[in-house]
């Protein structure tokens, strides 16, 4: 227990290590590699819907263009390595959706729109689901995850799976985000030697680089909002129970959720509507019955900040001066839009979350992964967490080349979820994050949301020492199981930095409204330049 208490779970999900890193960065960035202009750079779902509706574009043509883009800059060119596998049936699916549109009309705003999903989300098709691990190669799920099924029902074209921090960054405490044994290292499109953060690294990079219109990531603590921030995206971590986790390789039943990532708040709202809803295969969604909305775009209002009461979080460590200056600029922008800012809202309980959270995650990972693997029915090389550990050891030249598996080992020795140590830790997490944390401060000051920087700019990738992120604010909402949304607020030396809004359970409509208003007021997002290294001239 003493050893676990010294590990921040954000250090694990974002891969932070306490080691010094050799920067080795030139003061001046070299020229960008030859990345051809792409006609669908920064295109929105609404833009695509209009073209598909008018007949000026077909899903078949659009899907082919995205697949070519993946070949050009993900496999070759700057070699982002964000897409771990393309769907061999993508073109056939797109063609069938074109026929359906002609014969029956559109299913909705995602009809014929290419989407990428993270490689821990089950699909019953010709693609693998591996969490980036070689140990799951060949382990075919018996059916689609609920998220994949709902995307197909909405008419989306799942064009491929994205790379991730292996096992969603719950393998080794000195990990490098965006690396997996199966997919290699994902690279940030804003500066290729910088990290994409994680664990939804591939989804963040792919959407930022216009390899698909939108994408789906998953989060336990920071794994959607952090890569979205580092890659200049909007990312929404829903309330646990709004989106089904059935068929998603688990870490924590208390904190896991899938969520949308896109280049605009409206795109994220559209994707959220497609994947949200109750599911008998995920008991957590029973609490969210009736909470999902069919159209989240109805709440989007450019004047959404007017009159909103927002608590400003100040006591979040690790942020650099330039990130804090962007935060001050963001606060001034919100005030200009009519928001009422209540300063220095920092529940003291937030500083006490790390130890109980880690205990909960270790227990729940073992129980959840063993249950998931048992459903594969022997179709994968491994059937238990213990066998995963053994597989990695036997294949350490590939699996353990850069960092170890101490988290897997610590999880394996945990007992069942009936143990008092687990139950006490989970109760403590809920008390600190919910009743005495987010709920208490929102009620006390009659706040609509809290706000903080999402994280610092992307760090230089270091496979020797692991990650070294600067600052983060994801933990309170993650441990509470409450929603959070990040939206671009600016850049440090051309590296994107996000702003996060947090709220009470099921407050996604409020957070989307606030984020949309901020996005409209600031227009802070810039396209990636695919520079070899960051431009430090300004």
Image: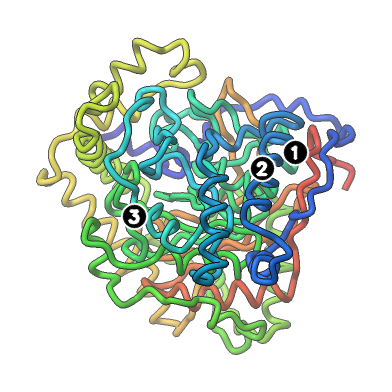
Marks 1, 2: nearer the viewer: 1
Alpha carbon separation for disc pair 1 and 3: 35 Å
For this view, does 155 lie left or right of residue 435? right
Badge 1 density bin: few <14, some 14–19, many ≥20, Cα 10 Å: many
The residue pinned by badge 1 equals 191
Residue nearest the observer in this picture, 142 or 330: 142
Q: In this view, does 243 lie above or below 226?
A: below
Evaluate whether residue 406 shows in this view: no
The mark nearer the N terminus, 3 or 2, is 3
Q: Do the residues labelled 1 and 2 touch (CB within 8 Å)?
A: yes
Q: Where does residue 54 sit, x and y in percent of width and height?
A: 69, 71
Q: Are marks 1 and 3 in contact (CB under 8 Å)?
A: no
Mark 1 lies on a secondary structure that is: loop
Q: Residue drawn 70% across and 83% down?
A: 337
Badge 2 density bin: few <14, some 14–19, many ≥20, Cα 10 Å: many
For this view, does 69 lie left or right of residue 246? right
Marks 3, 2: nearer the viewer: 3
Alpha carbon separation for disc pair 3 and 2: 32 Å
Badge 3 density bin: few <14, some 14–19, many ≥20, Cα 10 Å: many
Residue 524 image label:
none
Mark 3 lies on a secondary structure that is: helix
Residue 146 image label:
3
Q: Residue drawn 73% across and 35% down?
A: 72
Q: Where does residue 203 sit, x and y in percent of width and height?
A: 56, 46
Residue nearest the observer in this picture, 178 or 292: 292
Mark 2 lies on a secondary structure that is: loop
The residue pinned by badge 2 equals 458
Q: Where does residue 382 sit, x and y in percent of width and height?
A: 26, 23
């Amino acid at each position: 227990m003493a050893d676990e208490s010294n590990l921040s779970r954000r250090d694990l999900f974002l891969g932070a290590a306490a080691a010094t890193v050799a920067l080795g960065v030139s003061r001046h960035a070299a020229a960008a590699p030859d990345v051809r202009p792409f006609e669908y750079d920064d295109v929105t779902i609404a833009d695509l819907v209009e073209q598909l509706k008018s007949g000026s574009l077909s899903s078949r043509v659009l899907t082919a263009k995205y697949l070519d883009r993946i070949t050009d800059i993900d496999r070759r060119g700057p070699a982002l390595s964000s897409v771990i596998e393309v769907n061999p049936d993508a073109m056939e699916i797109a063609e069938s959706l074109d026929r359906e549109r002609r014969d029956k009309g559109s299913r909705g705003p995602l009809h014929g729109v290419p989407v990428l999903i993270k490689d821990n989300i089950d699909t019953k098709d010709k693609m693998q689901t591996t969490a980036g691990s070689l140990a799951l190669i060949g382990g075919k799920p018996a059916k689609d995850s609920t998220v994949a099924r709902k995307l197909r029902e909405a008419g989306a074209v799942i064009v491929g799976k994205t790379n991730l921090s292996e096992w969603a960054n719950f393998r080794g405490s000195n990990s490098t985000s965006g690396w997996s044994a199966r997919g290699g290292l994902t690279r940030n499109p804003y500066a290729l030697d910088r990290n994409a953060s994680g664990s939804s690294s591939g989804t963040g990079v792919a959407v930022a680089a216009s390899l698909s219109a939108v994408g789906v990531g998953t989060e336990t603590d920071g794994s959607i909002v952090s890569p979205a921030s580092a890659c200049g995206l909007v990312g929404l971590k829903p309330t646990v129970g709004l989106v089904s986790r059935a068929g998603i390789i688990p870490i924590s039943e208390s904190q896991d959720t899938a969520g949308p990532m896109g280049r605009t708040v409206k795109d994220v709202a559209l994707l959220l509507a497609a994947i949200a809803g109750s599911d008998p295969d995920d008991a957590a969604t029973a609490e969210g019955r009736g909470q999902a909305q069919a159209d989240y775009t109805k709440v989007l209002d450019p004047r959404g900040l007017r009159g909103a009461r927002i608590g400003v979080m100040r006591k979040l460590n690790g942020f650099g001066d330039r990130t804090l200056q962007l935060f001050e600029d963001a606060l001034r922008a919100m005030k200009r839009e009519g928001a009422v800012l209540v300063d220095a809202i920092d529940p003291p309980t937030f500083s006490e979350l790390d130890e109980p959270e880690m205990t909960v995650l270790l227990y729940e990972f073992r129980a959840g992964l063993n249950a998931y693997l048992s459903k594969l029915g022997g179709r994968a090389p491994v059937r238990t967490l213990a066998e995963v550990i053994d597989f990695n050891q036997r294949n350490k030249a590939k699996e353990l080349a850069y960092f170890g598996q101490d988290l897997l080992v610590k999880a394996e020795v945990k007992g069942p979820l009936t143990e008092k140590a687990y139950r006490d830790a989970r109760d403590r997490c809920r008390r600190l994050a919910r009743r005495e944390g987010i709920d208490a401060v929102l009620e006390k000051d009659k706040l609509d949301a809290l706000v903080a920087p999402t994280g610092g700019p992307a760090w230089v990738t270091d496979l020797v020492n692991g990650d070294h992120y600067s600052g983060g604010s994801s933990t309170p909402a993650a441990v509470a199981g409450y929603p959070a949304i990040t939206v671009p607020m600016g850049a440090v030396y051309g590296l994107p930095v996000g702003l996060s809004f947090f709220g009470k359970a099921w407050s996604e409509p409020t957070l989307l409204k606030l984020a949309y208003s901020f996005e409209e007021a600031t227009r802070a997002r810039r396209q990636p330049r695919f520079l070899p290294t960051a431009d430090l001239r300004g």
